[in-house]
Image (cartoon, rainbow, N blue to C red):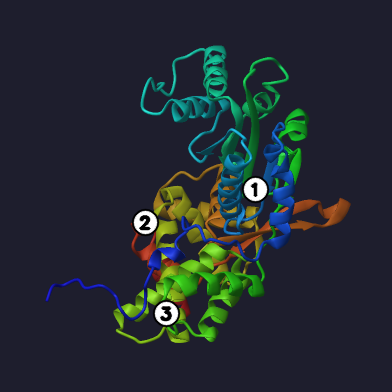
Amino acid sequence: MGLFQPDTDIFCHRDALREDYQPDEIVGRDEELQQYIAALQPVINGDQPANVFLYGKAGVGKTACTRYLLSELKSDAVEYGVDLTTIRTNCEDLSTSYQVAIQLINDLRGSENRLKPTGYPRRQVNEWLWDELDSIGGTIIIVFDEVDHIEDDSILYQIPRARANGNLKEAKVGIIGISNDFKFRESLSSKVQSSLCEKELQFPAYNANELRTILRQRADTAFYEDVVPREVIAKCAAFGARDAGDARQSLDLLMEAGDIAVEQDADQVTEAHVDEARAALERSRIVDGVAGLTQQGHLVLYALVMLHEEGKTPTRARAIQDRYKIVCDRAAVDSLVPRRMRDHLNELAMLGIASRVERNKGEVGGRYYEYSLDTNPDLLLEALDETVDMVGVTESIRKRRS
């Protein structure tokens, strides 16, 4: 008998819990789906597509709903004789409109005549893009996922206006912009807001009931019958709702609990497996987050951990700056100016290691942010031990505790 054998007790289709799995039906997003369908309706009528802007936290169904509805739309377009093409571009590594245009041209051309990342006049690149879109013709929907990574928004204005400006003759192009950043819309120029945000949909965080529905749907496909009891679904959903209303987080938790059940040769996934899975995922998240920090990021984190252990958080950035300078002196490293130090604090908040809360004390006190640790300090100290211990802070904190 070989080392590897098919799982016949727990998982029957584990991939159903993955982010890229597309269920046959979207659950927990009825209201948003109805609004989205209405926004896409002009396409099936053969009219110019509306430009749609979706925003909400990660893991709340924006991309899943988009994939699902565009698949349905393409199917219906065939039935009603509408010539429809959809293009999806992830903007995570694209910071300029120029880069986005190059990426779109290369996506449209396929492997032939691909452009280099740089070296062409902007006007020429735009003309190539219009030529490629017109050569496809018909109705074209371009999905810009993580659209907030584009720092200059000219392409978000040019594409929706291309037909009116005479740049496109054969193609009717619409944009779907997807963003996790609630404030991205405010950063757009007014002319881009009026075009990109023609139809605007906000996806709120899932509540526990919605997460239970999603998890049950996926579990029925991913696991064998009677392997995942109701209380396990409820616990995974409760954790997800409490943390961020993030379906992705709840699904990852359920998958990790299933993996632990397989490891332990169990007949069912239990609540104890969920607890073990949560601890394992949290440890992994923290280790990965800390490992990805720069030396200065570690020093800022050390300063925040020290203040937390002394009971001095939440606190303002200037108090953290004072402690950070002391840590830098111990490490024989030059400290950063306050603005750069705050950039590292904000990175910690983005990683979920710290939290950042805005305070408003009115005309006298003004507006400012308070920072605090948002992670199990023991796990953080373990992760910091795995980095180069430049200042011996972890040891000094443990001595203070004992």
**Where is mark 3, residue-wise?**
276
Q: Secondary structure at mark 2?
A: loop
- Percent of width and height locating residue 268: 40, 85
Amino acid identity at mark 3: Glu
Q: Amino acid at mark 2?
A: Met
Seen at 52% across and 43% down, the residue is 336
To which residue does mark 2 refer? 390
Single out the mark in the foreground, 1 or 2: 1
Q: Position of residue 135 (x, y in %)?
A: 53, 20
Tell which tag, 2 or 3, sits nearer the viewer.
3
310 lies above or below 156:
below
Spatial CA span between label 1 and label 3:
32 Å
Closest to the observer, 239 or 208? 208
Q: Secondary structure at mark 1?
A: loop
Residue 207 seen in the figure: yes
> What quarter of the picture does the N terminus occupy?
bottom left
In this view, which residue lies farthest toward the right?
363
Above-or-below relation of 246 to 364: below
Q: Earlier in the sequence, mark 1 or mark 3?
A: 1
Q: Residue at 48% of width from left, 37% of height from top?
A: 93
Q: Residues within 10 Å of mark 3 (few under 14, many from 20)?
A: some
Is residue 144 shown above or below 206?
Answer: above
- Residue under circle 1? 181
Between 56 and 391, the residue placed more toward the observer is 56
